[in-house]
Amino acid sequence: MSNKTNLVARYSASERINHWLVAITFVMLAFSGLALFHPAFFFLTNLFGGGSWTRILHPFIGVVMFVSFLGLIAKFIGQNHITKADLEWQKHLGDIMANKAKNLPEIGKYNIGQKYLFWSLVVIIPLLMLSGFIIWRPYFALYFPVDIIRVAVLVHAVAAFLAIMTIIVHVYAAIWTKGSIRAMTRGTVTTAWARHHHPAWYKEISRENKL
Amino acid sequence: MALQSLDILRRSATTTPSPGVRQTTEVAKLIDVSKCIGCKACQSACMEWNDIRDEIGSNAGIYDNPRDLSADSWTVMRFSEVEVEKDKLEWLIRKDGCMHCADPGCLKACPAPGAIIQYSNGIVDFHEENCIGCGYCIAGCPFNVPRISKKDNKAYKCTLCSDRVGVGMEPACIKSCPTGALVFGTKEDMIQHAEERIVDLKERGFSNAGLYDPQGVGGTHVMYVLHHADQPELYHGLPKDPSISPMVTLWKGITKPLMSLGIGLGVLVGFFHYIKVGPNEVEEESESEQQ
């Protein structure tokens, strides 16, 4: 993107498609999973064609998300190492959340909250895949002893809860920080947004003349 | 499945009371292992009444046939050769099948509303038309009883002939037993009958004879008279003190409301944060500064 439009490229088309593949499958998994977790959410099975269809589809959608997420890991892992500036930035979190932050350390493409999201999902999603595989009927559960299945159902439920909570924070952060969503829908952010939220990243791409 | 509908004690994945104005008497099947000759008439009667035929298996060199419970075999004889006293072989035969727990792990684990019903007479029944085939009942069961059919992916098990009991008849297996090892009646009567049998067995030298009505699952509506009640494991691994696994209790207990609440709160906290501090915006000046 050029200077005259005041825009900076943040995500390529393949990054965006990959992100939304994970996002769409995640929402489907959360809805179908919650439906089988608590009776209060059982009505969500209607979105998937009933209880049996929900049971059938959920694990297949899970495999699609897992594979897509591997793509996201490969694309984003390089930018997600936690730095000293990040830890310094974290100390200002209260002020940041209150919209009162001043003199923040310059951070790169991602702030520490985004990095925590990344690493949480790097742990949780494989855990969901593994525990889900163990309880997947009718194909795989029959190969595991019942004690292992009992641990797996609990791990699956707790991991899914943590993943949903993490994603609630992620979605809220995107809504709260104006100008962020277009990074994932259009691929670009304004230069002001980039300089304000990710100054070190902005400097880097300016230096590399990637504006 | 039966057409009873006013005597439901518990219904799977249902958070409000089910129709339960009709209080029926608690029933029980008593299996007197000391009288069982392993003839498998009960297996045949079960097949006939329920009109299901398992695939013909192969001889595995032991009497157990079919080898295991299945979606088509709701009761099987388990044969165990043991030496409780040295050099004194005992052939223990146990009719295996659903125990109809007062605190059913299958029902607790089931996510499909109305797929598992517990009647006030104590019968725990699967309503397969509501079953979604997830297999959670298998994880919930402390006795390894439910089986998922390969044909329709629905879970099946002994119904204690709820359709017969509902109209005042005894279960099919009881009818067929030639030795009186199987008896059926109110739970109270069955306990009394068992006590008489235990006195008899003790007189005959089985000093550890006793009733198997495990309290860890709230008692069961299928009970055993065992000659070695101190070692139920001898009878093809009948669990000594069965209870719903703590994993299942955690999974289907406190985590359900707590996590649901957590998710709801997470969304609300976000919403009110926005309402309180407003969006995190980049000021206009810095936008124009760039030009």
Image (spheres, coloured by chain):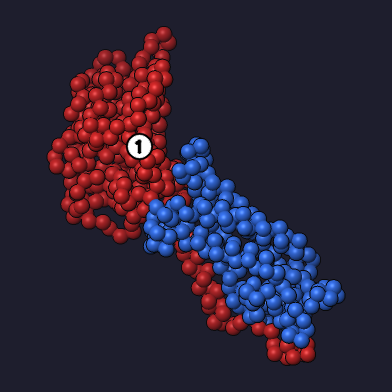
Chain colours: A blue, B red
Q: Is residue A134 visible?
A: yes
Q: Is residue A88 visible?
A: no
> What is the chain letter for disc 1?
B
Q: Secondary structure at mark 1?
A: loop
Q: Quadrant of the N terminus of chain B?
A: top left
Number of marks drawn: 1
Q: Residue at x 14, y 42 (%)?
A: B167
Q: Position of residue B30 (x, y in %)?
A: 24, 30
> Which residue is more in the foreground, B48 or A130?
B48
> Which residue is more in the foreground, B260 or B114?
B114
Q: Position of residue A130 (x, y in %)?
A: 58, 47
- Drawn side of residue B285 relative to residue A144, left or right: right
Q: Position of residue B166 (x, y in %)?
A: 17, 43
User: Badge 1 local density, few (<14 within 10 Å), some, or many (20+)?
Assistant: many
> Which residue is more in the foreground, A102 or A139?
A139
Q: Position of residue A48 (x, y in %)?
A: 43, 60
Q: Quadrant of the C terminus of chain B?
A: bottom right
Residue A176 in the image: above or below residue A12:
below
Q: Which residue is label 1 attached to?
A: B71
- Drawn side of residue A32 relative to residue B25, left or right: right
Q: Residue at x 35, y 30 (%)?
A: B55
Residue A182 falls in image quadrant = bottom right
Residue B37 in the image: above or below residue A81:
above
Disc 1 residue type (three-letter): Ala
Toward the left, the furthest residue is B168
Q: Residue at x 55, y 61 (%)?
A: A26
